[in-house]
Image (cartoon, coloured by chain):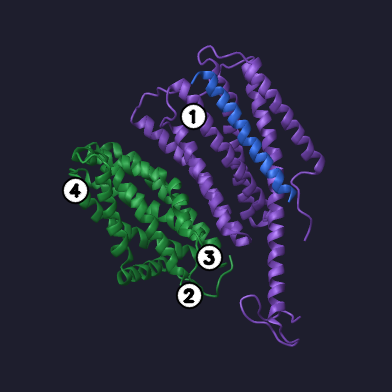
Chain colours: A purple, B green, C blue
């Protein structure tokens, strides 16, 4: 078995980690100190410097999962690495998506007065969270192997395809019944100056963090697979030995069959 | 795509065979009618206990309660549908007979749709009686129920197939299926509400959404089952 | 809770969650 695969060469991984830490530090300074409080929202607006990046990362992470899943299913590009990447990215996606929902709530409480609202984007994000929680649970239950990887890849693509459908149908629900959109979840596009800079730094910092963690998680997935394969081999070997077969016997049963050489 | 040596029946023929087999099994084993349907009726009772006994409220939320109940029942129905294939020797016989994944999928979806349709009729009648619902716009109700049921059946069968053979399929299936079918729940409930409110004309947009979802779900399932059928998956 | 409280909860909470996850991954990678 080859050594555990890395997603990036070691220097790049180190660079990403350092860059992420630096950018996050800059974000803290910019977001909490340098950027002025919003004219309308006051200090609560600072939560947006976290909420927008985490939302972006959730979409990016799930997008990577979907892409990797598609590449795994396509016979010409099939490789275990894609399956590993899909799983790793999905875990990060669920993490960021959960953060997005929590941060949105923390922002919504002071600004809207409520922890939650039944708006298209919020509902879609909540469903997205559960879709990929289900994907992760399915991965855990399916275990390893090509069949498992293909099933997981299909589940990822179905989940990803369902997201626009959910968003569209909920959006349609709101407009068809002409509910007045009291809540405006959009960040004011006229944002500029220090606030815009802080937001971009946030997006950059979280993207670097995602890339760094992705490499780590990918490596762990490879190590887990490696260990599981070793454990399986050891179990087979132990089983063969415990059977104590004579030299010319052909082992039969769940682990053996024609063609397995006798010890 | 390689497969067992067999000229292969036309897709519709295969699906009809599988559907007929599943429905025959159901007629004998009476799982959907004897267990899933009573479960659905119990849920109807539960909602009546949980919500305001004032019958006006139940009548107003009846469409939503109806479709939530159908979704929960569907989880049981598709779980059962896929489990039937796991019985010893069934898969081998199917492969030897030249059945391929797409035909099996379509047949199973058709069978589950029929079972759920029967369940919906009984469920609906019960709700009309217990929740004091005035039924109007019957055509819209039927026009919405068909693609909604098919979409639920297809999505459920797809995921049940993906999780088949695993240890925790029954506890995993709700988490997989319910988020994916949320557009169906939304569309079907709104269509039913429009029909019962006497605004049947508004419902056709929702019916269109339900058809789009159903077609995509069936297509996705056919692709998945087609790809996975031979290696023991799905 | 004042606005500052929500902001603090958001930033501290995010740092805690991401930090804990990073540490957890780090420990798993060392195994």
The residue tagged with tag 3: helix, strand or loop? loop
Q: Vertical placement of B77 versus A99: above or below?
A: below
Mark 3 or 1, which is nearer the eye? 1
Residue at image x 64%, y 40%?
C21
User: CA–CA distance between discs 2 and 3?
Assistant: 16 Å
* Dot 1: chain letter: A
| Badge 4 vs badge 3, beta-carbon distance below 8 Å | no
Q: Secondary structure at mark 1?
A: helix
Chain of the residue where label 4 is placed in the rendered structure: B
- Which is more N-terminal, label 2 or label 4? 2
Which residue corresponds to the image point at 34% horizontal and 27% vertical from the top-left?
A178
Which of pointers 2 and 3 lies earlier in the amino acid sequence?
2
Q: Secondary structure at mark 2?
A: loop
Q: Which residue is mark 4?
A: B130
Residue B65, position as x, y percentages in the image: 30, 45
Tags 3 and 1 touching, CB below 8 Å: no
């Amino acid at each position: 078995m080859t050594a555990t695969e890395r997603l990036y060469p070691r220097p790049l991984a180190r660079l990403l980690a350092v860059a992420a830490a630096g950018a996050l530090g800059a974000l803290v300074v910019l977001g909490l100190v340098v950027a002025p409080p919003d004219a309308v929202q006051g200090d609560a607006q600072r939560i947006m410097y976290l909420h927008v990046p985490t939302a972006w990362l959730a979409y990016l992470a799930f997008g990577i999962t979907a892409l990797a899943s598609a590449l795994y299913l396509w016979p010409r590009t099939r490789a275990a690495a894609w399956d590993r990447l899909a799983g790793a990215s999905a875990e990060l996606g669920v993490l960021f998506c959960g953060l997005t929902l929590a941060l949105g709530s923390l922002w919504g409480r002071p600004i809207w007065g409520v922890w939650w609202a039944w708006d298209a984007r919020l509902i879609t994000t909540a469903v997205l969270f559960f879709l990929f929680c289900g994907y992760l649970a399915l991965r855990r239950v399916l275990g390893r192997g090509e069949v498992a990887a293909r099933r997981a890849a299909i589940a990822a693509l179905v989940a990803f395809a369902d997201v626009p459908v959910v968003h569209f149908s909920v959006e349609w629900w709101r407009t068809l019944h002409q509910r007045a959109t009291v809540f405006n979840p959009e960040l004011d596009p006229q944002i500029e100056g220090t606030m815009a800079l802080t937001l971009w730094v946030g997006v950059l910092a979280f993207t670097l963090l995602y890339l760094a963690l992705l490499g780590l998680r990918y490596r762990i997935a490879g190590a887990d697979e490696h260990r599981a394969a070793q454990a399986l081999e050891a179990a087979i070997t132990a089983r063969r030995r415990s059977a104590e077969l004579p030299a010319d016997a052909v082992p039969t049963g769940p682990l053996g069959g024609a063609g397995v050489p006798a010890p | 795509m390689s497969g067992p040596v067999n000229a292969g029946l036309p897709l519709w023929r295969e699906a009809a065979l599988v559907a007929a087999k599943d429905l025959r099994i159901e007629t004998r084993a009476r799982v959907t009618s004897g267990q899933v349907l009573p479960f659905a009726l119990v849920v109807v009772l539960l909602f009546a206990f949980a919500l305001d006994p004032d019958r006006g409220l139940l009548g107003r939320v009846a469409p939503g309660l109806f479709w939530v109940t159908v979704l929960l029942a569907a989880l049981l129905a598709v779980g059962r549908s896929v489990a039937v294939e796991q019985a010893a020797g069934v898969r081998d016989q199917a492969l030897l007979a030249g059945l391929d994944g797409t035909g099996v999928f379509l047949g199973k979806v058709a069978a589950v749709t029929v079972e759920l349709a029967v369940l919906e009729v009984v469920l609906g009648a019960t709700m009309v009686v217990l929740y004091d619902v005035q039924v109007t716009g019957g055509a819209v109700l039927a026009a919405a129920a068909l693609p909604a049921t098919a979409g639920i059946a297809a999505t459920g069968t797809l995921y049940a197939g993906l999780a088949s053979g695993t240890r925790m399929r029954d506890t995993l299936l709700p988490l997989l299926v319910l988020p994916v079918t949320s557009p169906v729940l939304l569309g079907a409930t709104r269509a039913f509400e429009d029909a019962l409110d006497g605004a049947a004309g508004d419902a056709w947009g929702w019916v269109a959404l339900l058809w789009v979802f159903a077609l995509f779900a069936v297509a996705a399932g056919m692709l998945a089952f087609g790809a996975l059928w031979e290696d023991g998956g799905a | 809770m004042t606005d500052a409280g929500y902001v603090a909860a958001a930033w501290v909470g995010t740092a805690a969650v991401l930090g804990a996850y990073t540490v957890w991954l780090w420990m798993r990678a060392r195994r």
